[in-house]
Image: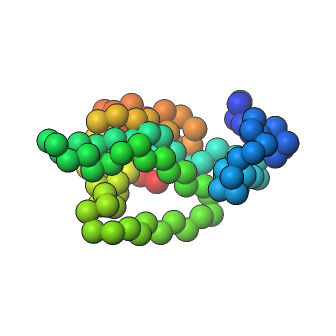
Amino acid sequence: MKEGLLDTVSDVPNPHWDGLSQYLARLVIEKGAALLTLRNIHKWFERVHALNGVDLYIYPGEVVGLVGDNDAGKSTLVKVISGRLRPDKGEIFREGEKVKSHQSKMLEV
């Protein structure tokens, strides 16, 4: 497992995390680093804040669905993931390694 990942669920820093946080911690322990990680992604179009602090983790073997209301930012998020749009703020990691903004077209997940 890559440096800094948790070894057991008891290593989770906050025992009061909600169920989703516990689930994500277990995924890290069981599957290792995510194939794709987006942290605190923001995208603005003039005054419209299309993506506001999006976090996304995609692990090996997962099937991910993206649902939401109209104008919720689904298409914008997919364009950021695909490299068609660059986020204005945030970090993207591919298999645990940070993707530089000029490399976003090379995500190919």
**For this rendering, which residue is in front, 59 or 48?**
48
Total number of numbered discs in the rendering: 0
Q: What is the x, y in percent for residue 95? A: 56, 43
Q: In this view, does 60 lie above or below 39?
A: below
Position of residue 37 relative to residue 79, above or below, is: above
Q: Which residue is at the far left? A: 46
Residue 91, quarter of the rendered image: top left
Q: Residue at x 71, y 30 (%)?
A: 3
Q: In the shown orientation, is residue 82 left or right of residue 59? A: left
**Whether residue 27 is visible:** no
* In the depicted structure, whether residue 38 falls above or below residue 74: above
Please name the residue shown 47% across and 69% down the image: 65
Q: Residue at x 34, y 34 (%)?
A: 89
Query: Is residue 71 in view?
Result: yes
Residue 8 figure quarter = top right
Where is residue 36 drawn, in percent x and y? 51, 48
Position of the N terminus, as image quadrant, is top right
Q: Position of residue 59 (x, y in %)?
A: 60, 55
Q: Which residue sits at x=48%, y=33%?
A: 98
**Residue at the extreme front of the image, as rendered:** 16
Whole-percent x, y for residue 61 in the image: 62, 63
How does the figure colour the protein chain or chains? Answer: rainbow
Q: In this view, does 60 lie to the left or right of 26?
A: left
